[in-house]
Image (spheres, grey):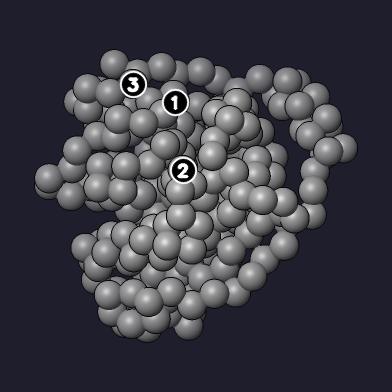
Amino acid sequence: MFTIRTFDEQHARRTNAAADAMRRVVKTESVVIPGPAGRLEGAVDSVDAAPRAIAVVCHPHPLQQGTMQNKVVTTIARAFAQLGAHVLRFNFRGVGASEGRYADGIGERADALAAIAWSRDRWPGLGLYLGGFSFGAAIALGVAAEARPRGLVTIAPPLDRLPADFVPPDCPWLLIHGVADDVVPFAATEERLATFGVRPQVLAMKDAGHFFHGRLLEVDEAITSFFGLELGAAS
C-alpha cells in the first residue's frame, strides 16, 4: 500500500555538500496570528527572493516541551525556505507567547487552520505545503483534507492521534520515520499506514531515533529531494 526506501548516506553527504555551496541566508520575522483561542506567536522563515510557495510547519506536543523552536521543526522550515517558500512556524495555544491552553488536539487543529488561513491571506495565490513533527505531524495530517495542500511532510507521526473522521491526503506525501524510534514505533506506523489506501513515500532511516540526533542533515536532504522539482515550478 505504500513505498518504503532507506536512506543512502553517501548520496546524502554528496547532495548536502553541493547544496551547502548554494545555500542562501534564511531570515526570520516574528509575527502574531489571530487564533481561535487568542493570539498565536509565529515566525516566518524566508530567503531574499519572491516566494514560490508558502509552507506551514507544526511543532511537537505542547505538554512535552514542544515549540516552534524545535530542531526538527526548524529543519523542515529551513528546507522549504531554501526551496523558495515563505514558511510559517507557530506556537500552538498555551505555548510560548501564544494565548489559550492545550485543547487535546482539537483546538490545535483549529490553530493550524488559522495559521494556514493567515498565510494564504498574506501571500494570496501561492501553493501551500504542510509539515509537522511528532504531534505536529498528526495535526498537519489531520487538517490536510480541509486545507488541501500541494504537498505534505510528516516526521515521526503518531497516527493514533488522528481524528475519528480522518480523510487521507490526496497530495504528494513524504513520511520520514526513524526505525529506532522508541516514542512513536515505526512498526505501529507501518501497520496503520496499510489501512489508509494511499501511497506516501516513506523514508525509513536506519538507527535514527525519535529526535533524529545527528541526522537532521539527512532530513533536510530528503525534503529537498522530494519537493525540489515541484517547488521549482510552484507559483
- The extreme front residue here reads 125
Residue 13: quarter of image = top right
Q: Is residue 191 left or right of residue 71?
A: left
User: Dot 1 corresponds to which residue?
Assistant: 202
As displayed, is residue 94 above or below residue 88? Answer: below
Q: Which of marks 1 and 2 is nearer the N terminus?
A: 2
Q: Which of marks 2 and 3 is nearer the N terminus?
A: 2
Q: How far apart are marks 1 and 2 (CA)?
A: 23 Å
Q: Distance between the residues labelled 2 and 3?
A: 21 Å
Which is more foreground, mark 2 or mark 3?
2
- The extreme left residue here reads 164
| Quadrant position of the N terminus in the picture | top left
User: Dot 2 corresponds to which residue?
Assistant: 127
Give the amino acid at mark 1.
Val
User: Dot 3 corresponds to which residue?
Assistant: 199
- Secondary structure of the residue carrying tag 2 is loop
As displayed, is residue 33 above or below residue 69? Answer: below
The residue under the point 51% across, 50% down is 54
- Residue 45 locus on image (x, y percent): 63, 59
- Secondary structure of the residue carrying tag 1 is strand
Local crowd at mark 2 within 10 Å, few (<14), some, or many (≥20)?
A: some
| Quadrant position of the C terminus in the picture | top right
Give the amino acid at mark 2.
Gly
The residue under the point 30% across, 30% down is 170
Residue 196 in view: yes
Is the residue under label 1 in contact with that under label 3 (CB below 8 Å)?
no
Residue 183 in view: no
The residue lying toward the viewer, choosing from 31 and 173, is 31
